[in-house]
Image (cartoon, rainbow, N blue to C red):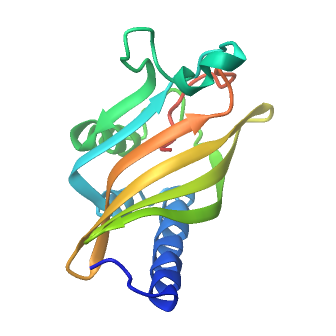
């Protein structure tokens, strides 16, 4: 049920914020199996490619001319689970040795609340370091749809909007 007063909305925002920060902690600690348990079976994680457009067309920055998204990432549960299994083998050319990653999630807001479904917006910084000199910084915005199942929240949708149109990282082996 949507919050019907300011206190309920504040408590819901705090609950969602705690969930998003705990998720970031799991990923940073490489506890990928625990992270998978937070995902809804129908989860979709998408990161459209931003295009450089003139000021009058900025609303279409992440879309193609035909209205279809060009994606850096477009994954469902099966693909995410497969990537976790691959990392667990210890044979992954881009993650051996493992990257050191820190995620900062901030500016969390409730954009929509509809029953047991919440659309939350936030800003993020992801810093990755590997070996002696490989460093990547991804900065952007996210729109996360969480669905409450009993007492547990599950990630149903994640849209990641990077603040860059050219990917500087060598790969996207990290979970976003």
Identify the residue at horizontal 64%, vertical 21% (top origin).
167
- In the shown orientation, is residue 101 left or right of residue 78? right
Identify the residue at horizontal 60%, vertical 17% (top origin).
57
Q: Nearer the viewer, residue 126 or 47?
A: 47
Q: Is residue 92 visible?
A: no
Residue farthest top in this picture: 65
Q: Quadrant of the N terminus?
A: bottom left
| Residue 94 image position (x, y, % from top left) | 54, 29
| Residue 152 image position (x, y, % from top left) | 28, 76
Say if 89 sits above or below 55 in the image.
Answer: below
Residue farthest right in this picture: 133
Q: Quadrant of residue 107?
A: bottom right
Q: Nearer the viewer, residue 123 or 170?
A: 123
| Residue 98 image position (x, y, % from top left) | 58, 43
Identify the residue at horizontal 59%, vertical 64% (top origin).
108
| Residue 43 image position (x, y, % from top left) | 27, 48
Number of disc labels: 0
- In the shown orientation, is residue 78 left or right of residue 85? left
Q: Quadrant of residue 12?
A: bottom left
Residue farthest front in this picture: 56
Q: Nearer the viewer, residue 125 or 118?
A: 118
Say if 65 sits above or below 57 in the image.
Answer: above
Say if 93 sits above or below 108 in the image.
Answer: above
Q: Nearer the viewer, residue 112 or 125?
A: 112
Q: Quadrant of residue 138?
A: top right
Say if 55 sits above or below 134 in the image.
Answer: above
Q: Is residue 44 visible?
A: yes
Identify the residue at horizontal 33%, vertical 77% (top origin).
2
């Amino acid at each position: 049920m949507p919050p019907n007063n300011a206190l309920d909305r504040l408590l819901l925002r705090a609950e969602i914020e705690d969930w998003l920060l705990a998720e970031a902690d799991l990923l940073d600690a490489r506890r990928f199996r625990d992270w998978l348990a937070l995902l809804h079976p129908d989860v979709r994680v998408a990161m459209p490619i931003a295009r450089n457009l003139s000021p009058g067309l900025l609303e279409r920055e992440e879309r193609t001319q035909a209205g279809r998204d060009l994606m850096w990432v477009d994954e469902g549960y099966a693909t995410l689970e497969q990537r976790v299994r691959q990392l667990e083998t210890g044979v992954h050319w881009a993650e051996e040795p493992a990257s050191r990653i820190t995620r900062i999630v901030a500016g969390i807001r409730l954009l929509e609340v509809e029953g047991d479904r919440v659309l939350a917006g936030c800003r993020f910084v992801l810093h990755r370091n590997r070996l002696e000199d490989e460093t990547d910084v991804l900065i952007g915005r996210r729109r996360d749809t969480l669905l409450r199942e009993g007492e547990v929240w599950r990630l149903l949708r994640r849209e990641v909007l990077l603040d860059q149109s050219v990917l500087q990282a060598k790969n996207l082996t990290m979970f976003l």
